[in-house]
Image: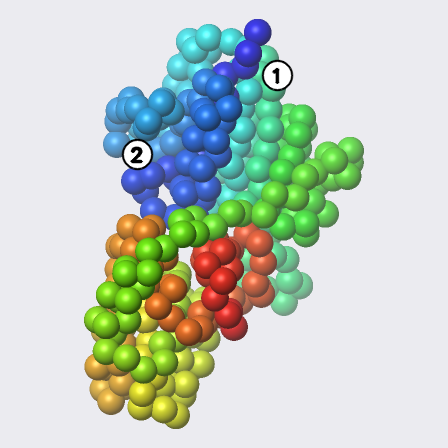
Amino acid sequence: MSRAWHLLTGEYPPAPGGVSDHTRSIAHALLQAGETVHVWTPGAEGLTDDQGVTVHRWPGLFTPPGLVRLTRELDATPGPRRLLLLYVPHAFGMKAMNVPLCAWFAARRRDERELFLHEAVYPWSPGAPWKHQLLAGVTRVMLRTLALGAERAYVSIPTWAEHLPEPLRSQARWCPIPSPLPLDVPAEAVSAVREALGGGPTVAHFGTYGGAIAGPLEAVLVPLLQRDERRQALLLGRGSQAWSESLGRKHPALARRLHARDGLAPEAVAAHLRAAELLLQPYPDGVSARRSSAMGGLGLGLPIV
């Protein structure tokens, strides 16, 4: 008998984010292979159909009371079932220390269980504040707990496998995150973007402008623009408009050359990236195959710094 897939994720479209996009790509690939697919994710109460994928949402889904309901509703679906947990510690609430979820997953012995590690553990450093030390320790306990119940594991970068116990560690499969953007972009769409930018060499950044990246990005982008008045900055992704306005207030001379495009559809993001000469992507932990923003540029053939 065919097993229905049940994807457990902290985010799913229309919620934005790399995990959201990746979960949807997996769900629809399984659907195209003839599988039955359910997605369970927090959000406004409701049961919706995403082109054949059944999406279950309710607030507090992965809290202890929510897990009681999840157990009841999962058990009401036809078996056999295969659970796939798309794991990022901070995506499941409780300040990235959702131990109850991990214990619940390990205890679901009636179902096949698979684990996809987008992120595995919080980094540990002997000189870190005690709160960070606690988080690093708890996320390691959480991962060990999940491993007790997982029959198969997939990792977005090979390093995550090192945190898994044997035999799961040696059997873990590396699955780089694919580009979230279409790879074929109409030439006329690229030309329209270049015309709107007004000419000049364009440096792009694609991201969400969080604190860990915004600082290094500003440190590199500002002198890059100051050295040549022809250069333009194209800022793409959630938060780009607010960050562009803030940067423009700090550096008024650069404001007219900062072009923010917040909330674009994937097709439009791809056209804007293709219009740039260079993609500037500083990451605090280095570039890797788990960074969908870098994979998006790579898929479009952009030079990336």
Q: Residue 58 location, x and y as percent?
A: 31, 28
Give the residue type that dot 2 points to.
Gly
Q: How is the image coloured?
A: rainbow
Nearer-the-camera pick, 44 or 47: 47
Nearer-the-camera pick, 157 or 145: 157
Q: Residue 161 location, x and y as percent?
A: 69, 45
Q: Residue 211 location, x and y as percent?
A: 40, 66
- The residue located at (21%, 81%) in the rendering is 256
Nearer-the-camera pick, 51 or 103: 51
Where 211 falls versus 164 (above or below)? Answer: below
Report whether residue 209 is seen: no
Relative horizontal placement of residue 75, taking residue 245 as reference (left or right): right
Report whether residue 303 is seen: yes
Residue 109: mark = 1
Residue 98: mark = none
| Few, some or many residues within 10 Å of mark 1 (<14, 14–19, 20+) | few
Q: Quadrant of the N terminus?
A: top right
Q: Quadrant of residue 150?
A: top right
Q: Quadrant of residue 271?
A: bottom left
| Few, some or many residues within 10 Å of mark 2 (<14, 14–19, 20+) | some
Give the residue type that dot 1 points to.
Arg
- The residue located at (60%, 24%) in the rendering is 113
Give the residue at mark 2. 43
